[in-house]
Image (spheres, rainbow, N blue to C red):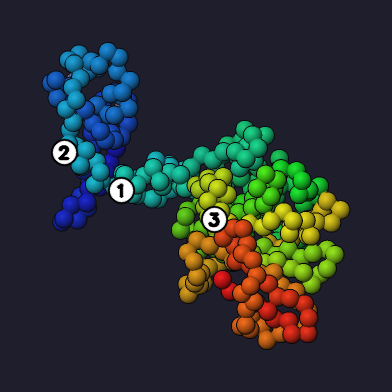
Amino acid sequence: MAKFKVNKKMGPVAVELPECPVCMDVMSAPIFQCQSGHSICNSCTRILLPPICPICRQAMTQMRNWQLEELISKATVPCPNRSTGCVYTVVSTEMEDHLKECIFREMACPIGIAFGRCSWSGKLKDILDHFKERHSNHCYLNTDNDININNISVSVDERYMYLIPQGKFLFILTLKVDTCQKLAYWVVQHIGSKKTAQQHIYGIQITSKQDDKRTVIFTDKCFNDAFDVNEIFRQARCGIMPLTMLSHFIKDGKLSFKFYVKRNQQNFKTKEKGHGSVKETNKGPRGPGPQSAGNQSRGKSPGPMHLHQRQKGPKGGNSNKQ
Ligand SMILES: [Zn+2]
Ligand SMILES: [Zn+2]
Ligand SMILES: [Zn+2]
Ligand SMILES: [Zn+2]
């Protein structure tokens, strides 16, 4: 029998809630009863054919066990991954969300999820070793070095993915070239909880090989891996760059960029929640800096990214704040 803690007004009390007599699993709403009053979990009720109680052979009814449903909704339950190290205890209705980001869960290989080329699954602590062994070209161990993508073209749809460890945390960088939308998307996800993800800011800095004064910097908060990356692309909640612009940074089919992750400062403020910012700078003669008057006539970028551009020339320092 599973042990639960129920939050009553007088404080948490440890009680034991009944398990489903059919599957022996934790009951979840709606809970239906048979004619003589046995309660059976939702998933078991749905597959009963004919709808006869497996305990007493009486017919199942549409009668709900409201008290039990309420008790279960208030109960805090330990994470099922407790045996492998998780110490989380959450209200049962929030368990589903926790299980998506529990770092002790069984995880599928991110390469397998994205490209279907790997069937590995395992624990978070083993992912890095798995990448080193099987996907070493998708793994960046030292972010002091540039990340290099060879054979990239703005005329071919492709997705590039890298696993990047930073201290004890793991991050996944995804770059998608979408020739239909004519856009490149950049997303960084932390493997772990949403909370930890939001405590990290990533930065991508791309410098033109033709003109080293031409640099684009994008910074944003990280998502966690429970967030579907395709949904992030679709909602444009990421770095977005026109392919025409990206092409300026590709030389002989090669794209190089710098990547870093840093701890989100407590007083870090973004003007628009959930949006990042992009700067395009030309390190010419330094102007008065980013506080100088903006050139408001510039066109808007296609995505939510904020283009801050500085122009060449003796004045320099033209910046744009949108
Ligand atoms: Zn059941
Ligand atoms: Zn019964
Ligand atoms: Zn857990
Ligand atoms: Zn794999």
In the image, residue 95 lies at what x, y percent?
36, 44
Q: Are marks 3 and 1 in contact (CB under 8 Å)?
A: no
- Name the kind of residue labelled 3 in the image: Arg
Q: Nearer the viewer, mark 2 or mark 3?
A: 3
What's the residue at 67%, 52% (across, down)? 183
Residue 257 or residue 23, whichever sits in front: 257
In the image, residue 135 lies at what x, y percent?
71, 43
Question: Pointer 3: what residue?
Answer: 237
The answer to which quarter of the image holds residue 69 is top left
Q: Secondary structure at mark 2?
A: helix
Question: Pointer 2: what residue?
Answer: 67
Using the image, determine if residue 147 lies above or below residue 73. below
Question: Pointer 1: what residue?
Answer: 91
- Name the kind of residue labelled 1 in the image: Val
Q: Secondary structure at mark 1?
A: strand
Give the position of the C terminus as an image quadrant: bottom right
Label 2 residue near ligand 2, CB within 8 Å: no
In the image, residue 318 lies at what x, y percent?
68, 79
Residue 76 or residue 85, whichever sits in front: 76
- Name the kind of residue labelled 2 in the image: Gln
- The answer to whether one can see residue 77 in this image is no
Q: Are marks 1 and 2 in contact (CB under 8 Å)?
A: no
Residue 105 or residue 29, whichever sits in front: 29
**Can you tell which mark lies on residue 160?**
none
